[in-house]
Image: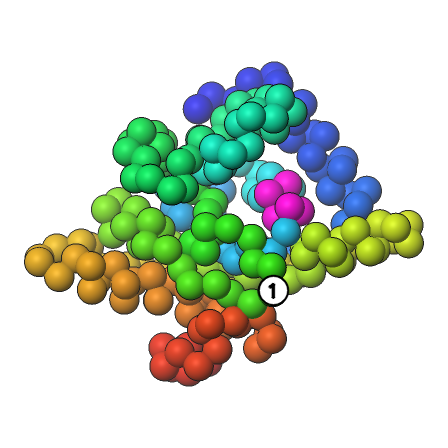
Amino acid sequence: MKPTVLFSVMRFMIHLLGWLISRVDVEGLQNLPDTGGCIVAANHLGRLDVPLVYYLLQRDDIIMLVAEKYRKYAVSRWLVEALGAIWLDRFNTDFHAMRQTLERLKAGGVLVIAPEGTRSTTGGLLPGKPGVSYIAGKTGLPVIPVAVIGTEDERVLAQLKRLKRAKARVKVGQPFYLPPLRGQDREAILERNTDEIMCRIAVLLPESYRGVYSDHPRLRELA
């Protein structure tokens, strides 16, 4: 997707808003490439996570998937379309969204996605869904794990009510590759690859944020 004037204006507004309401400490930013196709997989804590993507990634080819439920609101519909995001039906197999995503990845875009599929209300990691591991196995592109801390909606709102900027931490891990989807055991491979992605994210998080992956054997290996 070629950047438009509206996209540039939106990015400027996001940067301004991000600076006004939050202080972001970033570790490992050099692991995010400036060009080329890749998949950024992160945990999802709050609404601030989405503008953080555009705040940190200095790229015009960001691919974001947004739940269809937000399409009914005029403001969110306008924002999603202005930023070139892709609408996703989370409750059915959305072949149209998948085709768009794969096409833009093939063109060199960067997909930023939360494998959990929704915000965590507890702060801890939820079970990952297989969509990200499917895309990684299908494209052969590197996966870059990202841990986000401090963007919970309640925490951000509490800080803003006290006229303080929310403090968020972002930790970017090393890129890694997943094996291609071959053979008859695709379901088992998808499950194993999904666990790999989630444990790579979990190891970047404090223990209290690791959720259902706290005792995973692969996490212990990575730690």
Q: Please, which residue is most extreme toward the left here?
A: 184
Q: Quadrant of residue 218?
A: bottom left
Q: Is residue 201 above or below residue 44?
A: below
Residue drawn at (79%, 45%), measured in percent from left and top?
21
Specify few, some or many for label 1: CA neighbours under 10 Å numbering under 14, 14-19, or 20 or more.
some
**Rendered residue at 73%/42% (across/down):** 18
- Let me know if residue 22 appears in the view: yes
**Residue bearing the label numbered 1:** 123
Name, please, the residue furthest toward the top.
5
Is 210 magenta? The answer is no
| Part of the protein shown in magenta | 47-51
Left or right of 30 on screen, residue 197: left
Q: Is residue 15 left or right of residue 131?
A: right
Q: Which quadrant does the N terminus fall into?
A: top left
**Residue 159 in the image: x percent, y percent?**
83, 55
Q: Disc 1 residue type?
A: Gly
Secondary structure predominantly adopted by residues drawn in magenta: helix
Instruction: Specify the farthest residue to the right.
Output: 162
x and y percent of residue 144 in the render?
A: 43, 56
| Residue 205 falls in image quadrant | bottom right
Front-lying residue, 130 or 64: 130
Viewer-nearest residue: 97 or 219: 97
Q: Horizontally, is 44 left or right of 105 in the view?
A: right
Residue under the image location 45 percent in, 73 percent down: 213
Q: Where in the figure is residue 55, as x and y percent of width and height?
A: 64, 42
148 in relation to 199, above or below: above
